[in-house]
Structure formats: structure tokens, C-alpha cells
Image: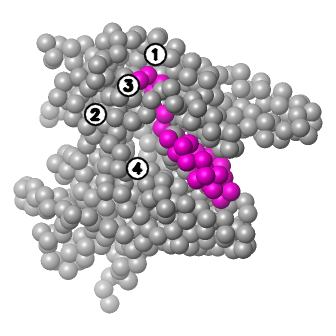
Amino acid sequence: MNQRQLFRLIIPAHPYKNVFSAVSSRMTSLGPILVATSVNKSFWDVDVEVIDENNYLGPRDKNNLPRTTECHGREPGSTKFVLPGEPVVRGLPDHKILQQQWPADFVGFYCGLTSTMPRVFDLATFYQKENAVTIAGGDHAAHLPEEALGSGLDIVVRGEGEFAIVEIIKAIKNGTGLGRIAGISWQNNGKIFHNPPKALQIPDLTDLPYPDFGLLRFARKMILYPINRTRGCSRRCEFCTVKRQPRWANPEKAVEEIAWLVQTKKARYFFIVDDRLNEDDEGTRKFFELIIKAKEEGWLPKNTSFSVQIRLEAAREEELLKLMRRAGVSMVCIGYESPIAEELKAMKKGIKPEDMVGYTKVFKRLGFWVHAMFIFGYPTQSAVESVKMSAAEKVKEFKKFMRQAKPDTIQVLLATPIPGTELYARLEKQGRIFPRNLIGWENYDGGHLCFKPDEPMTAEEVQRASIAIMKWFYSGWNFWKIPLLILSFPFIVPFSFSFWSRRWRNSLWGYAGYLIIKKWLKLNKQSQWLERLSLAQKRTIINQI
């Protein structure tokens, strides 16, 4: 019999604690799970495991070494180093121990987040030295395959990975070579090859297997399960990489998958991670109708709950929203992006500020929790007629809008030029992206500014302004609201439990947000972030001259 082999798929750790950290520790990314499931179903002699470094309770590195970066101040050919005071990431998974206990022959890396790429490169280099075949998949590596192949990765999948990964492992096991596998990049004897892609890799998502979350090793108990029925988006937002042709699984298959997770994992809370929930409008309606029917017939628990990502304009389809509420959708995550018309136009968002407050009121009237996602400091120069506003004036506009719309929770991220987006191409052409020896990939997380902002704003002003909005919304006053709400419970609840519960939940989340921001500010002070930002802007201005 052939010796069994191991395929280990790694979801790398976030470089900083951020607004996603709490959720990440009780959830996982769906794409890597589907890739691992496909491998597990295709080979009898290959064992499979997923290591999610953000949701992990296994062996940890006790050295507490400084977080490695690309690195700051590095010149070509120099060794890696970090600036004095660089924050450390303590207790990351110890891959030396993992490799000693159960050596991996194939190691896959999820490269969907640009900010995690330095961690990917460090781990890929380690596993390459361990003679494992290292494989990258995800948007960042797909758009910059040469960088990945020069940083410890042997193969880059430039599209969807569920079926491509099976072909790659088969080719390596059988020794047939990689030349015939569509949509991958690889190298041989220092020469890089880019195999042409298929027109559409997975036309029908019904063909995908149910995700096997049992492959997740050393994880905490999952609370929120990601599910997916559609992929792709027909919209063309400038800052987004999701511009693939929309496709979907049939609604029946999606509901069966949920029922299977309820039965096998006792799942109750689901996050629908579709790029655009109602891309397939007819199928989306049928999906929620089937969920309602399943609850009425008793083969899906009544308390099965969903959170979704949806565009604000869905408020025009009130019947769909009512259907979603009946099905158990409790929270909607909506990309508002900006209340400033010129910025929305530059983003190609296709919505007007004057409509946004009214749309929000529709969601809240129907009982949804509204999580509003904003982008501060979006660059308009050379995209549309530039808006000449100071950072303070923009902060005022954002606060004014939030007072009117009254979202339950918010996140205010900075515009981030992710590789593969039109925004990245525009800012790179203008020479506005900060040098990466000062602002590395790990700072492309939405919390750190990575380019020279529109005049008259400075980089430091934009950075401070985005945090000022978050501090204003998630103030320490939320801590004192909690006991006041407890005391008011007997008096308010008999008249309106929904009124009380919304304020109770928002106060808890508000205080949690306050603590996260406080810790984030402390880490950035240690890393001298504002000083580095000022230096990066000066060098960018000099280069432009």
C-alpha cells in the first residue's frame, strides 16, 4: 500500500487585532473549508486538515518573537528587521511542532487578505524548507503571482480552487506535470509559467460539496457558520476585487446544506457570505421561502438565525426584506461607504447620499440590526471632480449622517488600494501609493492609510480622523449604559421589549468596540505608526516631484 500523505491548508493570522478579530475566533473562512473538502473527497490516501490561525487552540510558539514584516526600511538584499517598538503577536501557532507531529506533504495557503501576506510568506518559506509543496490561492496571490512564487510558494491558483487543487495534487502524485492545469502559475528551474485560465471554472455552484467543518483542527467551538449560495457580483465598485461573473447553487441545495449543518454540528447561527445576496433575485426569494417552510414543518429549528451582506438599495424590495425577516435574518451588513456624493461617484457605487437615510429607516422599521460599513478618505482626484474638503469637514459629514441614519453598529475603514482593483491601478499610476519598505502589506487592513490622500488633507489627519469617528460612536459611555438598562428593564420591557433589547445589544457592542479601539491605539503608538506615516508621505511627495 502507498504511504498516506497529508494536505494542510492554512488560514493565516491577522497581523493586528481589529474589528473582525472577535468574530474570526468563533468562525472560519468558507473558501478554504470547501477546498479542503474537495481534496478529502477525492483521495483515499491523502489526509486533510485546516489550520485557522485566528481560531486556534493548538500548540503555540512560546518565543514571542517580534512580528515579521516585509520589512520596514529594508533595502534590496538586506536581512529582515522591524522598527523599535514594533508590536509583537504572541502565541501564534507553532508550525514546527505541527510538522513534527504530523508532517504535511502539501500545504495550501489562503491568500484572500492582503494584510496577511507577510505571514503567508514566512510560513511558505518554512514549509518549502520542509520539502512540502506550497500552494497559494486567493485574490492577492492571483493578482501578483510572481511575488508569491518568489516568496516561498511553488504554485499559485489564479481562480477558484475547489477543483484546481485536486488536479494539482493528482499531477504531482502521478508525476504528470503541471502544464495542462488551467489557471495556475508555477515555476521550473527559475522560469515562471502562467497557464491560461478556463472561461468559467465552476459554472454551477450546485456541483460543490457540503463544507466539512470537521476538517478544522485545533479550533474553538464554532458559533457562526459561513454558508454561500451565490458568487460574483454584476456591480463594478472601483475598490472591490469581486467582479466575477455571477453564479449560484440552486436554492434546494443551499437549504439542504443548512439542514445538514444543523443535524451534524448543532449549528444555529449562519452568516451568508454571498458577494451580493440578491444577485439571483428569483433564487434568493425561493431560498428564503424554503427556509420558512422548513421551520414550519419542523425539520429546521425555529431559532435558526442568519446574518447577511446586502446592498442598501435592497430597501426598494420591501417584500424581499419581509421574507428575509420571516426566515430568521436578524442582521444586515451594509456597505454605505460614504455620505459624500463625490466619493460615491469615484467609487462607482451607484447610489446617492440623499437616498441612504430613507433606505436605512426601511431596514430598521422591519426589525433588522443594521451594521454600517464606511470608507473614510476615499481619493477622488483624477477619478471625478475632486471634492476639496478638510479631514475635519469630512468627519462632520460622517457624524451628521450617522445621527440621521442611526445604524446599530459601524466600522469606519480607510480606503485601501488592494492589488487587482481599479483603485490600486489608479493610485499606482498617479504615484500615490506609499513605499512598501515603509508601509508593508500587513498594513493593508483598512485600519492604516497606505497612500497619499487628496489635498488639502495630510496622511496623519486622515488616520486620526477615521479613529475619531469610531471613538465618537464607540465611546466609554457605553459602559455606564449597561447598568442603567438593567435597572430600566422592568419599566420598559412590558411596553416595548424590542426597544430595550436593541439598546442593550448596542451598548454591549459599543463597549466592546471601545476596548478594541483603545487596544489598537496602544499598539500603533508602540509601533510609531504616525511617524512612519509622515515619513512615507514625505517620500511619496519627493518621488512625485
Q: Position of residue 290 (x, y in %)?
A: 61, 68
Q: Give yes or no for contact between labels 2 and 4 (Cβ–Cβ under 8 Å).
A: no
Separation of marks 4 and 1 at Cα, in angstroms = 35 Å
Task: Tell us which disc is closer to us: 1 or 3.
Answer: 3
Position above or below: 408 against 383: below
- Which quadrant does the C terminus fall into? top left
Q: Which mark is residue 423?
A: 2
Residue found at the very far bottom of the displayed protein:
1
What residue did someone put label 1 on? Answer: 394
Q: Is residue 115 part of the magenta span, yes or no?
A: no
Viewer-side residue, 234 vs 487:
234
Is 106 above or below relative to 326?
below
- For label 1, the crowd category at 10 Å Cα-Cα, with few meaning under 14, some 14 to 19 and many 20 or more, is many
Q: State the image coordinates of residue 80 (x, y, percent, origin top left).
A: 26, 35
Evaluate if marks 3 and 4 touch, with contact meaning CB atoms under 8 Å apart: no
The amino acid beneath tag 2 is: Leu
Q: Is 274 situated left or right of 270 in this image?
A: left
Q: Residues within 10 Å of mark 3 (few under 14, many from 20)?
A: many
Most foreground residue, 149 or 349: 349
Q: Is residue 230 visible?
A: yes
Nearer the N terminus, badge 2 or badge 1? 1
Closer to the eye: label 4 or 1: 1
Q: CA distance from mark 1 to mark 3?
A: 11 Å
**Type of amino acid under label 4:** Pro
The numbered mark at residue 534 is none
Q: Residues within 10 Å of mark 2 (few under 14, many from 20)?
A: many
The range drawn in magenta is 313-341
Q: Nearer the viewer, mark 2 or mark 4?
A: 2
